[in-house]
Amino acid sequence: MFTLEVCADSLDSAVIAQSSGAHRVELCVSLPEGGTTPSRGLIEAVRKRLSIKLYVLIRPRGGDFLYSDAELEIMLADVRACGKLGCDGVVIGMLMSDGAVDEQRCRLLVEEARSGGMGVTFHRAVDRSRSLTEAMEVIIGLGCERILTSGGRNAAPEGAGAIRELVEKAGGRIGIMAGAGVTPQNAAELIKITGVSELHGTFRSRYAGGMRYRNPLLGAPDEEHSLWRADGDKIKSILSLAGA
């Protein structure tokens, strides 16, 4: 059964994702940094309005995936908060300095999520690991539900062959979800090549904002007078192409 997950960085995008037929939302903020953990207020607002599954990104900052003890404390607290807010799952990923999955610390996060009745996705930190297949075996051992990956490349279409290999080696033991650079133009071919049953993306478009006044002394850069949000037509197009 095909699943489409929309990565949403706002309440509007999460609601659009649901109304357009998405099966799950991954909620985050700071997309230009690759995503970080959203505020408790945003999580609560989205949870109240969504009936589909809601997973929250647990990432205290941008940058690499090598975290300090203090950052781990933050992540554990954020996982607990997600459980209390009724989230369905969290999205995690931690690495060691040598590129291996930080199994010990990830296990703490997985156990915290399970105690809150939540599932766990391992995010694209896996694409920064020293070996996708080695990382996958560790992640399976941690009890994660799925791995989000671009096949170790900048975009999933470029890493399609590696994603296919993961799907085959997983043998149904864990879900493999392709993400990064997924569009209505390449989604069908990506599914065909990789054999994945889950796709992930922001599927956004830029829309004009509602401000009529613009300070002439500041100029008028488009990014300050427009909004990025999920595009329902893109979401519906991918669902149609996937036969969902």
Image (tube, grey):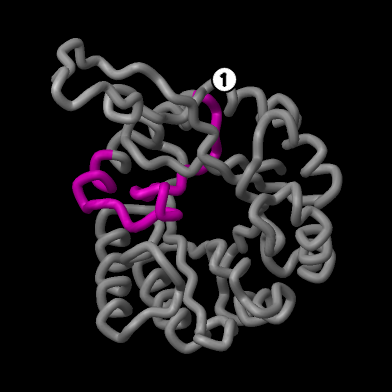
Residue sitting at 74 percent across and 47 percent down?
157
Tell me the quarter of the picture where residue 162 sits.
bottom right
Tell me the quarter of the picture where residue 21 sits.
top right
Q: Which residues are magenta?
A: 20-45
Residue sitting at 40 percent across and 76 percent down?
109
Furthest residue to the front? 217
Q: Position of residue 71 (x, y in %)?
A: 29, 77
Residue sitting at 49 percent across and 70 percent down?
93
Q: Secondary structure at mark 1?
A: helix
Q: Position of residue 139 (x, y in %)?
A: 60, 76
Decide: is 170 above or below 28: below
Residue hosting label 1: 233
Q: Position of residue 59 (x, y in %)?
A: 37, 64
User: Number of callouts in the render?
Assistant: 1
Asked if residue 42 lies in the magenta stretch, the reply is: yes
Asked if residue 224 lies in the magenta stretch, the reply is: no
Local packing at callout 1 (Cα closer than 10 Å; few below 14, some 14-19, many 20+) is: some
Name the quadrant of the C terminus.
Answer: top right
Does 113 sit left or right of 202 as displayed?
left
Check disc 1 and give the amino acid type: Asp
